[in-house]
Amino acid sequence: MIYLNMIFTFFKIGLFSFGGGYAILAMIQQEVVIKNAWLTEAEFVQIVAISQMTPGPIAINAATFIGYQKAGILGGLLCTLGVILPSLIIMLLITVSYLKLRKQRWFQMVFKRLRLLSVGLIAAALIMVLGHAVENAFAVIVFAACFIATWRFKLNPFTMLIISAVVGMIFGTA
């Protein structure tokens, strides 16, 4: 019965939590520590710390560690499956719908508008970050050089990240 309860709890967490890994932690804490009493507050804090240190999404890591701590390997697998299953189902439905509707004119228009929306969201994120990232003229010059090099010469963004880090260490001011 614990296995069924664990997969259902983490399915619910995966289905109704929005806002990324750190936002999901509050819901996990509510379900795991307060509602089901599977862990103490101290154990939950330790699992969150371990989840932050291990590679991968914090919510999936936390689900895996909580399941393992409460019910062994099978518990870890079921909690992990429970938290990722809602996203998997939703993406599967979207993909199937897309494949069936992609030639429909109205569907193409919806996706055309969604592309514009995504450009707007990226621009909004850029504007929010830009205010904190631009501290001096040197930062603006490095940003402009990286932007032009990436766009004009099709350089790999990872390469530009390494180059800008080296330039910042050599010529930057603290």
Image (spheres, grey):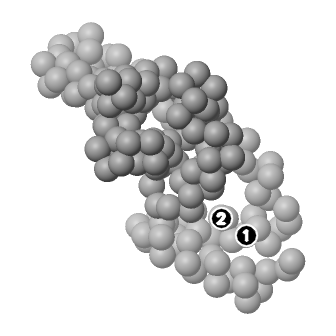
96 displayed left or right of 141:
left
What residue is drawn where x is 55% and y is 78%?
A: 162
Q: Is residue 80 above or below residue 89?
A: below
Label 1 amino acid? Ile
What residue is drawn where x is 26% and y is 15%?
A: 107
Label 2 amino acid? Ala
Q: Is residue 95 above or below residue 101?
A: below
Q: Mark 2 near mark 1, Cβ–Cβ under 8 Å?
A: yes
- The image shows residue 129 at horizontal and vertical percentages of 72, 48
- The image shows residue 74 at horizontal and vertical percentages of 29, 44
Mark 2 and mark 1: span between their CA atoms? 5 Å
* Residue 144: numbered disc: 2
- The image shows residue 36 at horizontal and vertical percentages of 54, 25
Q: Is residue 153 above or below residue 49?
A: below
* Residue 93: numbered disc: none
115 displayed left or right of 27:
left
* Residue 135 image-quadrant placement: bottom right
Element class at badge 1: helix
Q: Residues within 10 Å of mark 2 (few under 14, many from 20)?
A: few
Pointer 1 residue:
141
Name the quarter where the C terminus is drawn. Answer: bottom right
Question: Who is closer to the viewer here, 80 or 5?
Answer: 5
Q: Residues within 10 Å of mark 1 (few under 14, many from 20)?
A: few
What residue is drawn where x is 67% and y is 83%?
A: 167
What residue is drawn where x is 64% and y is 78%?
A: 165
Question: Who is closer to the viewer here, 3 or 62?
Answer: 3
- The image shows residue 154 at horizontal and vertical percentages of 41, 67
Please say whether residue 91 is visible from this viewpoint: no
Element class at badge 2: helix
Please say whether residue 35 is visible from this viewpoint: yes
Name the quarter where the N terminus is drawn. Answer: top left
Q: Is residue 99 above or below residue 69?
A: above
